[in-house]
Image (cartoon, rainbow, N blue to C red):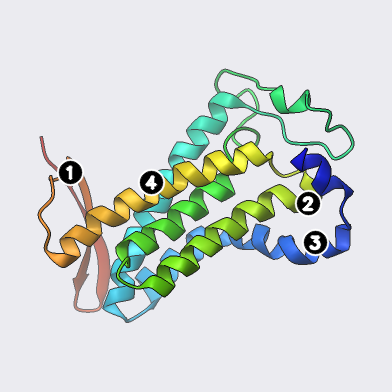
C-alpha cells in the first residue's frame, strides 16, 4: 500500500521533497564522521566523530550481511500488487548486496544519528535533530524515486536496527565521558590525539 501510494504521487513534487534525503543518506554516513573526526579542530566533535564512525561501520557491515542473505526484490512502481514484496532469494549473494532487506540507507543513517544523540544525550536539541534526521532519511527511501527504492518494512527494520546499534555504541562512550563505570567490552576502539596526528587504537581483552 505504501509503495503504491508513492508511485501515484507527483514525481516532481516528491522528487524535490525526498531526493535530497536519498542523497544525504548516501553520503552523510561517510562525510559527517569524517568531518567531525579528521577535519574539525574541536575535540568534542572529534570524539563524537569517533563514536559515529564506529557505529556507522558496524551498521554498514551488519546491513550488507543481511542483504546478501535475504536478497529481497525492490518495489516496482508498475507492479506493486503485493506479491513482489514477498520475493526473497535466500542464500548468500544471490542478488548481491544492493537488493535485500533491510534498507541500508535507513540503517546506517539511523546508527549515525542515534550514536551522536546517545553520546550527546545531555543536549536535547541535538537528540531531537538526530531523531528528525533519521526519520527523514527513512521516509525518503520509501517515498522517493516513485517508491522504487525500498519497501516500508525495509525502512522500518533498518531504522530500528540502526538506532539500536547507534544508541548502544553511543552509550558506551557516553559512560566513559561522564566517568560512569561500565562492563568493559572485549573489543574496544578508542580515538588517539597526539600533537597534530589523529588516529585510533584497537584493544582486545579475553
Say which quadrant the C terminus sits in.
top left
Task: Give the total number of marks visible in the rendering.
Answer: 4
**Which residue is rendered at x = 53% and y = 57% of the image?**
134
Measure the alpha-carbon separation of dots 3 and 4.
30 Å
As rendered, which of 64 and 83 lies closer to the eye? 83
Label 2 crowd (10 A; few <14 / some 14-19 / many >=20):
many
**Which residue is rendered at x = 32% and y = 81% of the image?**
41
Residue linked to disc 4: 165
| Residue 146 on image: x %, y % | 82, 49
Q: Are marks 1 and 3 in contact (CB under 8 Å)?
A: no
**Among numbered discs 2 and 4, the one appearing first in the sequence:** 2
Label 1 crowd (10 A; few <14 / some 14-19 / many >=20):
few
**Among numbered discs 4 and 1, the one appearing first in the sequence:** 4
Do we see residue 60 in this rendering? no
100 relative to 196, above or below? above
| Residue 143 on image: x %, y % | 74, 51
* Mark 3 residue element: helix
Residue linked to disc 1: 185
Label 4 crowd (10 A; few <14 / some 14-19 / many >=20):
many
Residue linked to disc 3: 15
**Among numbered discs 1 and 3, the one appearing first in the sequence:** 3
Where residue 47 sits, quadrant-wise, is bottom left
Amino acid at each position: 500500500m505504501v509503495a503504491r501510494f508513492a508511485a501515484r504521487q507527483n514525481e516532481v513534487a516528491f522528487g524535490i521533497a525526498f531526493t535530497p534525503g536519498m542523497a544525504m543518506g548516501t553520503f552523510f554516513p561517510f562525510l559527517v564522521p569524517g568531518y567531525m573526526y579528521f577535519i574539525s579542530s574541536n575535540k568534542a566533535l572529534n570524539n563524537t566523530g569517533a563514536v559515529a564512525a564506529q557505529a556507522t561501520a558496524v551498521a554498514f557491515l551488519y546491513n550488507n550481511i543481511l542483504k546478501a542473505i535475504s536478497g529481497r526484490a525492490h518495489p516496482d512502481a508498475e507492479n506493486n500488487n503485493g506479491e513482489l514484496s514477498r520475493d526473497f532469494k535466500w542464500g548468500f549473494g544471490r542478488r548481491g548486496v544492493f537488493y535485500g532487506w533491510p534498507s541500508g540507507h535507513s540503517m546506517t543513517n539511523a546508527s549515525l544519528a542515534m550514536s551522536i544523540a546517545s553520546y550527546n544525550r545531555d543536549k536535547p536539541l541535538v537528540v531531537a535533530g538526530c531523531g528528525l534526521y533519521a526519520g527523514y532519511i527513512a521516509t525518503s527511501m520509501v517515498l522517493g524515486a516513485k517508491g522504487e527504492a525500498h519497501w516500508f518494512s525495509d525502512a522500518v527494520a533498518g531504522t530500528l536496527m540502526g538506532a539500536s546499534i547507534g544508541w548502544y555504541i553511543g552509550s558506551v562512550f557516553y559512560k566513559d565521558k561522564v566517568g560512569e563505570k561500565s562492563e568493559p567490552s572485549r573489543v574496544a576502539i578508542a580515538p588517539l590525539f597526539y600533537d597534530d596526528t589523529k588516529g585510533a587504537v584497537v584493544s582486545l581483552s579475553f
